[in-house]
Amino acid sequence: MGRNEHYVKRVKWPDDGSIKAAAIRNGNVIWALPRPYRHHDVIEFLVDCVGREPPIGPGSGYEQGFIGPSGEFLTREQAAELVGKPGKLFSEDIW
């Protein structure tokens, strides 16, 4: 466990049908920051506050995605499907 990881908070997201946050998943642990934060902000948080070592991105075991309407982790493809956009969703596409 990295430094400051004991500060993790479980958040209950209101289910209003919208994407809630940019998120990064590693195994069964998900880190997320609410809009208007983007994935690079989550990466910066992981490096600066949690003590994770870069790289944090494709091919590193960390998967970028979003927190969906019910608080579930969505891949970029699942999030794109939810908002009706073909391909992958990026936070720049929605906020």
Image: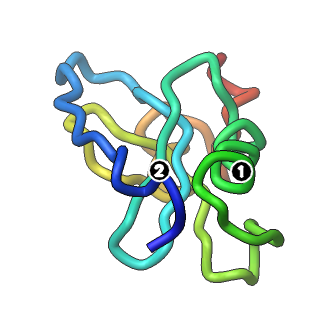
Q: Marks 2 and 1, how far apart in space?
A: 9 Å
User: Image check: 19 left or right of 37?
Assistant: left
Count neighbours of disc 1 (C-alpha within 10 A) and say few if under 14, some if 14 to 19, many if 20 or more: many
Q: Is residue 35 above or below residue 62?
A: above
Q: Where residue 48 appears, x then y in whole percent?
A: 73, 48
Residue at image mark 1: 43
Q: Amino acid at mark 2?
A: Trp
State the residue at coordinates (82%, 71%): 55
**Where's residue 65, x and y in %?**
54, 52
Instruction: Between residue 58 and residue 8, name the one nearer to us.
Output: 8
On the image, the x and y values in percent for residue 1 come to: 44, 73
In the rendered view, would you say 5 is above or below 14?
A: below
Left or right: 16, with 32 as reference point: left
Question: Is residue 92 shown above or below 9?
Answer: above
Question: Which quarter of the rendered picture does the C terminus lie within?
Answer: top right
Based on the displayed image, in which of its 4 quarters is residue 58 positioned? Answer: bottom right
- Which quarter of the picture shows residue 22? top right
The residue depicted at 52 percent of the width and 47 percent of the height is 23
Answer left or right for 34 relative to 95: left
SS state under label 2: strand
**Which disc, if any, is residue 10?**
none
Whichever of callouts 2 and 1 sits on the residue coming sooner in the sequence is 2
What number of labels is visible?
2
Viewer-nearest residue: 18 or 5: 5
Label 2 neighbourhood size at 10 Å, few (<14), some (14-19), many (20+)?
many
Q: Please give the residue where the numbered disc 2 appears in the rendered image.
A: 31
